[in-house]
């Protein structure tokens, strides 16, 4: 009679396991009821390598529905999204975004827009000037609406087994991006998002974040960050970078370089002038 071995019981999913991955070290965790939503959110990682497999139309529809389920200020819904699938247009956008080759390899590229154009037209149809759209508040509102919508879509896409990555480089040449996408005045590409099925041959780890002691303020803002916590986070990031075959530079050195001067912004230092050229008043 053949011997039988008992299968190992499945590992219990707990907050402790996922917090350890998110912060790169053990974290004290109070007992909370775990669920699939928390797992999806805490498991997020940027995916830059994709299989040559198209994203089904039904998934795009659900992603947009998830995006439209996000909160929106005063129900203005001041955002839109352009789904770019044709290789030629993606190639041009990839060129404008640094260049960025993953826009080419991803089968779907979503460009998230702050869209005041639709609201301006509605105001005109009702005999109003829409002057309220001329102020910084409205431009900021559109960018926030687009960001909230995009993050909802990202969570939905990742829950369905797809990988994503935000592309801030789409702001390097916003006027040219507007031409490629046929954007009317008062519509601005806030960021892009590559979408596709992750290539299993390329392992991607969850990138550790700053400890909560540096981002969570209780009652009032704590002006002085903990040097010890920053040093510890640098060590955590160096370990992560080494594991990912990256230069082990830590976090603070990389960030200091990223914000060192106007040149580090890769053309975005003139963003206010470009935004006004694209039809936004931004008073």
Image (spheres, helix red, strand yellow):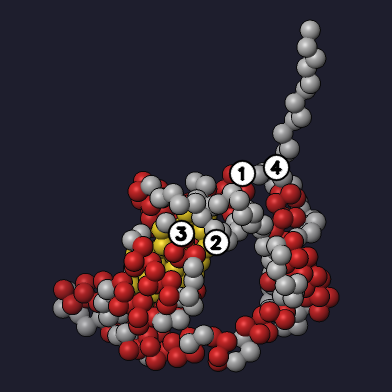
Element under label 4?
loop
Q: How many marks do you count on the picture?
A: 4
Neighbour class for label 1 at 10 Å: few (<14), some, many (≥20)? few
Residue indicated by mark 4: 13
Q: Residue at x 59, y 49 (%)?
A: 200
> Pointer 3: residues within 10 angstroms few (<14), some, or many (20+)?
many
* Residue on which the image places disc 3: 106
- Camera-near label (4 vs 3) is 3
Q: Residue at x 38, y 52 (%)?
A: 60
- CA separation, marks 4 and 3? 31 Å
| Quadrant of the snapshot with the C terminus | bottom left
The residue indicated by pointer 2 is 48
Instruction: Mark 2 vs mark 4: give the one in front.
Output: 2
Q: Residue at x 38, y 88 (%)?
A: 274
Residue 65 screen position, x and y as percent: 38, 53
Alpha-carbon span between mark 1 and mark 4? 9 Å
Which sits earlier in the primary sequence, circle 2 or circle 1?
Answer: 1
Which quadrant of the view contains residue 218? Answer: bottom right
Residues under numbered marks 1 and 4 in contact, where contact means CB atoms less than 8 Å apart:
no
Residue 245: % across, % down = 71, 65
The answer to the question of whether label 3 and label 1 lie on touching residues, with beta carbons closer than 8 A, is: no
Which one is in front, 114 or 206? 206
State the SS at label 2: loop
Alpha-carbon span between mark 3 and mark 1: 29 Å
Looking at the image, residue 22 sits to the left or right of residue 93; the answer is right
Residue 35 is labelled as 1
Sort mark 2 into few (<14), some (14-19) or many (20+) by Cα contacts within 10 Å: many
Decide which of tag 3 and tag 2 comes sooner along the chain: 2
Q: In this view, does 196 lie above or below 132?
A: above
Along the line of sight, which residue is nearer the eye, 84 or 16? 84
Question: Mark 3 or 1 closer to N-term?
Answer: 1
């Amino acid at each position: 009679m053949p011997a039988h071995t008992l299968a190992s019981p499945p590992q219990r999913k707990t907050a402790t396991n996922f917090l350890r991955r998110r912060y790169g070290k053990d974290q004290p965790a109070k007992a909370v009821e775990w669920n699939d939503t928390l797992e999806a959110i805490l498991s997020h990682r940027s995916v830059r390598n994709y299989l040559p497999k198209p994203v089904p139309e039904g998934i795009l529809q659900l992603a947009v529905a998830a995006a439209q389920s996000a909160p929106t200020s005063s129900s203005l819904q001041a955002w839109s999204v352009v789904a770019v699938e044709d290789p030629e247009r993606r190639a041009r956008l990839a060129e404008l975004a640094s260049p960025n080759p993953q826009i080419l390899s991803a089968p779907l590229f979503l460009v998230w827009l702050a869209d005041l154009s639709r609201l301006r037209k509605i105001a005109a149809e009702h005999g109003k000037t829409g002057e309220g759209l001329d102020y910084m508040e409205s431009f900021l509102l559109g960018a926030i609406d687009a960001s909230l919508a995009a993050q909802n879509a990202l969570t939905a896409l990742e829950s369905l087994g797809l990988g994503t990555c935000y592309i801030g480089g789409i702001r390097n040449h916003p006027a040219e991006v507007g031409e490629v996408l046929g954007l009317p005045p008062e519509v601005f590409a806030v960021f892009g998002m590559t979408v596709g099925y992750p290539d299993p041959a390329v392992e991607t780890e969850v990138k550790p974040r700053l400890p909560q002691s540096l981002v969570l303020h209780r009652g009032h803002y704590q002006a002085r960050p903990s040097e010890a916590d920053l040093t510890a986070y640098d060590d955590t990031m160096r370990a992560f970078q080494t594991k990912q075959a990256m230069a082990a530079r830590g976090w603070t050195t990389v960030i200091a370089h990223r914000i060192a001067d106007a040149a580090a912004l890769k053309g975005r230092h003139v963003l206010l002038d470009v935004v006004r050229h694209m039809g936004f008043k931004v008073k």
